[in-house]
Image: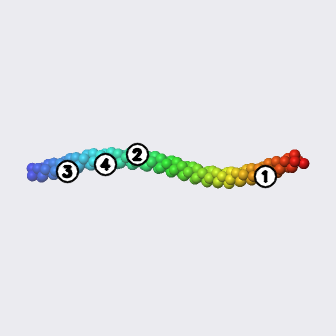
Amino acid sequence: MKVLAAQTAKASQEISDQIAEIQATTTDSVGAIKDISATIQQIQDIAATIASTVSEQSAATMEIARGVQNAANGTAEVATNIGKVSTGASATGSAAAQVLLSAESLSAESSNLNTAVERFLSDIRAA
């Protein structure tokens, strides 16, 4: 009986030791799971920050693209206006040349008229 009691006590002790070991392992596992959960939360926070930054960068890039497009449109408009000014200047130059020719012709006609009037007056005086 004593042997049986000793074996039962020994078996009970082994079971108790195994239960304590399982409890310690469970406690360690719970701690590891908490650490993993904290790490996952940090990763989620970092991912949210990255997503927010990418969104802001995307918005800034779109604003830059809009500004570049506006600048391109303005440049095209300036080029068109320069073309119009060039056309206007050319037309003005042609008109000025025409006025100069007309003025020279008028000056020649005036000179001819002056000569004809002087001849006419000279003829009248001689008569």
Q: Pointers 2 and 3 in contact (CB under 8 A)? A: no
Q: Earlier in the sequence, mark 2 or mark 4?
A: 4
Q: At numbered mark 1, what does the secondary structure look like: helix, strand or loop? A: helix
Residue under the point 79% across and 50% down: 115
Q: Nearer the viewer, residue 11 or 86?
A: 86
Q: Which residue is mark 2?
A: 49
State if disc 1 and disc 2 touch (CB < 8 Å).
no
Label 3 to label 4, Cα distance in Å? 26 Å
Residue 10: percent from the left, percent from the top?
13, 50
Mark 2 or 4, closer to the camera: 2
Q: CA distance from mark 2 to mark 3?
A: 46 Å
In the rendered image, which residue does mark 4 sit on?
Answer: 36
Residue identifier under label 3: 18
Badge 2 density bin: few <14, some 14–19, many ≥20, Cα 10 Å:
few
The residue depicted at 27 percent of the width and 45 percent of the height is: 31
| Amino acid type at image mark 1 | Asn
Q: Name the residue: 68% across, 53% down.
A: 97
Q: Nearer the viewer, mark 3 or mark 4?
A: 4
Callout 4: SS: helix
Of the residues tagged 1 and 4, which is closer to the observer? 1
Q: Classify mark 3: helix, strand or loop.
A: helix
Where is mark 1, residue-wise? 112
